[in-house]
Structure formats: structure tokens, C-alpha cells
Amino acid sequence: MTDATTSCMRPGVTHGERYLWLAVIAQALVDVRDETFDSLLYNQAAAFFSDGGYWRRSREEIADLLGVTAEQIQAAGLRVVNARRLEQGLPPVLPRPTTPRVPAPAARRAEARVPPPPRPPLPLLVAYHPAPDQPAPTPKGNGWRRRYSHNPFDPYRPLPSECRDAAD
């Protein structure tokens, strides 16, 4: 059962997986060809074929599973995308370069990390003391905190009648 289509697949890839990813690519081609121009499905399908980053990595993974190159998938998709764009009177999409981004030199990175200027000191806070001629506030005798200071539903709390009996 080794033929040209299965011999270049990644080992361990079943025919079901292969057909699944072929269907994904076919659906993306159909979306580019048939969906409304600039709809969400059209934009995502066109991005799959033309954009870099995660889309490029997805193309590479699918191409690896199918035994083809990512450039072959991209070229097939760009043909359909560009035909659709030309119908709309727009310029064709060019494939994005696949050169990796180069990090900034160490000298430039060091310049970019300048510490912020020091903060001004916080103002000194002064504690408030009431005037000496005013008397201190007196607590109220029968406020709600005192009245509800004990849970009336506490099973171990004595009943009010038991408290009155003990006081007599």
C-alpha cells in the first residue's frame, strides 16, 4: 500500500488525518472563492494563505502532515486569492517574506531600558487631634451594637427568662 501519495507523508499519519487536513485546505479555498469579499471567513482564509506568523506555522504543520511544502499550499491559495482580488479591482497579494526577525543589538536594548526619574517624596501627614476644650464623646448605652451583640439563635445562650430568674 505504498504509493506516491502515502510515501511522502509523515510516519504515523493515518489516511483519516490526511483527508481531514486536505478538507481544511479545500474549505479555505472554497471560502476564498465563494464567500463575500471582506467577510470574516474570507479574511481568515486569505490570511491562512498569505500571512506570516501563526498562519505560516499552520501552513508548515499541515504541509508536513500532507507530505508537501508550505510554499506549495501558499502558491495554490494565492492564485485563488489574487484572482478574487483582481475581480474586485484590487492589486494582487504578494507572499510575505519568511525571513525571521532579528533581535535588536544588545547596545540598543540597553539604551531603551533607562530607569525612570526618582519620585518626589510624599508629603508629611499630620495626625488630627481634637481641640482640648471639647469633651471626648461618650458611648451610648443602648445602641444596636449592644442589643445585638449576642446571637439570639445560639443554642448555648441562656434564655432571657433564665437571666431574669438568676438576677432575682
Image (cartoon, rainbow, N blue to C red):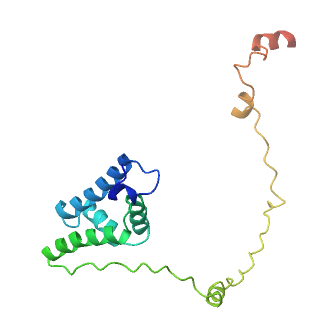
Q: In this view, does 98 lie above or below 13?
A: below
Residue 66: percent from left, percent from top: 37, 59
The answer to which image quadrant residue 80 occupies is bottom left
Q: Which of 110 and 140 is in front in this view?
A: 110
Residue 133 visible in the displayed image = yes
In this orientation, which residue lies closer to the viewer: 93 or 122?
A: 93
47 sits left or right of 39 in the view: right
Residue 162: horizontal and vertical position, in percent? 80, 10
Residue 168 can be seen, yes or no: no
Q: Where is residue 22 in the image (x, y as percent from the top left)?
A: 31, 55
Task: Answer above or below: position of 118 versus 84.
Answer: below
Quadrant position of the C terminus in the picture: top right
Q: Residue at x 36, y 78 (%)?
A: 96
Relative height, residue 92 to residue 76 (above, below): below
Q: How many marks?
A: 0
* Left or right of 116 in this view: 165: right
Q: What residue do we see at 39% from left, 61% from top?
A: 67
Q: Which residue is at a point 27% across and 78% down the rendered structure image?
A: 93
Q: Can you tell which quarter of the image residue 143 is in?
A: top right
Q: Residue 15: x percent and y percent?
A: 36, 48
- The residue shown at (86%, 11%) is 166
Front residue (pair 119, 125) = 119
